[in-house]
Image (cartoon, rainbow, N blue to C red):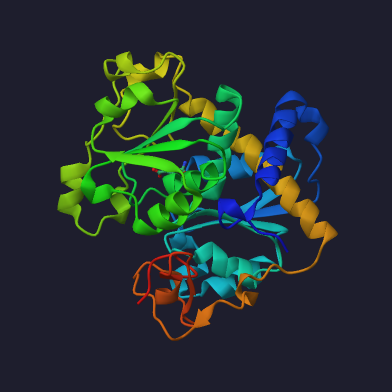
């Protein structure tokens, strides 16, 4: 059974194929109107969401399928203490495919190991958000014609911003791509992404705190919200929340064809006046997310039909069990009692938790 937990679960060719399907859906929507007739998508959202949940639901409805689920943790049995594993087993009895969002890092991975239907990670804490990356990729592809040779600026909360972690993972596989990481020091990219994604792939990158300095060199500017809900220290959030605001004036030094992305919701990072600039692509990006989710649902349901073999990341012989404990309080290991601590040595020798990718000692 194939699931989507991390964007690099799919090869570069598979991602192109999803882009191709999404473009075909845009051109010929009628052709797909009954493609998922009789199939059900469960949306299990343990964290707030507008775009991701509604675009998943719209995607399934436009494919002729139906949807069931909940949008608040308090209305599910998780509030009574049900484990992710049990929830996944139970929902597999009612639905053909699951989209899950949780504040727990590694939650979708745990669900996929226990569900008998495909699981899609719709965001797991500050870790990753692969379907937002699918929306980002389709937008970049349609605006820029491809992915090679692009300089992309990632601006804002690079520490907790899961969309950035996933997009960097995807971009690390294209040629001559550069990353400009724009954040205050306190919100810089976590080491595991820096070492295991950027350095491992050899992607050229630079770090700066100044959006103004970075802007002239960029082909794409990826703005992000400061992730208030992930801060342990609320005073720090107050201090950092307005670190970057993209204004019409700052855009004057940008390339004429720079593309401005934002996974949304925006709070204050982009002035509404920028919406009228033709470089603003973030609402288009939200629309494209629906088409990529349609392509993704089609792919995973097709594969589930064709091949009943279970994908098991834990069959990897290099996984080390129980000797090292993950100390990330937001990791699935911390809340799911039945899980064994599991880690793996990355190429640079650091031991990382299999669920949340944080270093373990
Ligand atoms: C993002 C998320 O949830 O991580 N939003 C989304 O899914 N479109 C970004 C955010 O919440 O800031």
Is residue 22 or residue 217 the one in the foreground?
A: 217
Q: How many badges with numbers are in the image?
A: 0
Tell me if residue 133 comes above or below residue 271 in the rendering. Answer: below
Is residue 349 or residue 9 the one in the foreground?
A: 349
Is residue 228 or residue 1 the one in the foreground?
A: 1
**Which residue: 50% across, 65% down?**
107
Ligand 1 sits in quadrant:
top left
For the N terminus, which image quadrant?
bottom right
Q: Position of residue 12 (x, y in %)?
A: 65, 45
Q: Position of residue 80 (x, y in %)?
A: 46, 74
Q: Position of residue 97 (x, y in %)?
A: 69, 57
**Which residue: 63% across, 72% down?**
114
Tell me if residue 107 comes above or below residue 314 in the rendering. Answer: above
The picture quadrant where one finds residue 352 is: bottom left
Q: Position of residue 134 (x, y in %)?
A: 58, 41
The picture quadrant where one finds residue 328 is: bottom left
The picture quadrant where one finds residue 268 is: top left
Tell me if residue 81 comes above or below residue 233 in the rendering. Answer: below
Residue 48 visible in image: no
Is residue 360 or residue 71 the one in the foreground?
A: 360
**Which residue: 53% across, 26% down?**
284
Q: Is residue 36 left or right of residue 343?
A: right
For the C terminus, which image quadrant?
bottom left
Q: Is residue 133 left or right of residue 255?
A: right
Residue 336 visible in image: yes
């Amino acid at each position: 059974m194939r699931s989507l937990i991390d964007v690099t679960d799919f090869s570069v060719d598979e991602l192109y194929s999803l882009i191709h399907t999404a473009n075909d859906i845009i051109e010929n929507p009628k052709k797909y109107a009954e493609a998922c007739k009789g199939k059900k998508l469960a949306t299990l959202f343990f964290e707030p969401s507008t775009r991701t949940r509604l675009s998943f639901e719209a995607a399934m409805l436009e494919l002729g399928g139906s949807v069931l689920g909940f949008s608040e943790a308090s209305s599910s049995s998780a509030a009574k203490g049900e484990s992710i594993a049990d929830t996944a087993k139970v929902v597999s009895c009612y639905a053909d495919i699951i989209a899950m969002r949780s504040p727990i890092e590694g939650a979708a991975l745990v669900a996929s190991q226990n569900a008998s239907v495909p699981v899609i990670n719709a965001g797991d804490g500050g870790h990753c958000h692969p379907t937002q990356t699918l929306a980002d990729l389709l937008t970049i592809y349609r605006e820029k014609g491809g992915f090679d040779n692009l300089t992309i600026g990632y601006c804002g909360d690079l520490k907790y911003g899961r969309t950035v972690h996933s997009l960097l993972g995807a971009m690390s596989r294209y040629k001559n791509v550069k990353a400009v990481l724009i954040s205050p020091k306190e919100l810089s990219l976590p080491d595991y992404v820096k070492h295991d994604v950027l350095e491992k792939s050899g992607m050229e990158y630079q770090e700066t705190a100044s959006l103004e300095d970075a802007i002239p060199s960029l082909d794409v500017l990826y703005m992000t919200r400061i992730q208030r809900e992930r801060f342990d220290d609320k005073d720090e959030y107050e201090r950092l929340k307005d670190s970057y605001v993209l204004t019409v004036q700052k855009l004057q030094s940008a390339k004429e064809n720079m593309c401005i992305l934002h996974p949304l919701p925006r709070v204050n990072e982009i002035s509404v006046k920028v919406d009228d600039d033709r470089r603003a692509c973030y609402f288009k990006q939200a629309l494209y997310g629906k088409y990529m989710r349609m392509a993704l649902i089609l792919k995973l349901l097709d594969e589930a039909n064709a091949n009943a073999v279970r994908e098991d990341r834990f069959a990897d012989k290099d996984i080390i069990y129980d000797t090292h404990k993950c100390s990330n309080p937001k990791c699935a290991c911390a809340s799911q009692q039945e899980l064994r601590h599991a880690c793996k040595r990355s190429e640079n020798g650091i031991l990382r938790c299999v669920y949340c990718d944080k270093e373990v000692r």
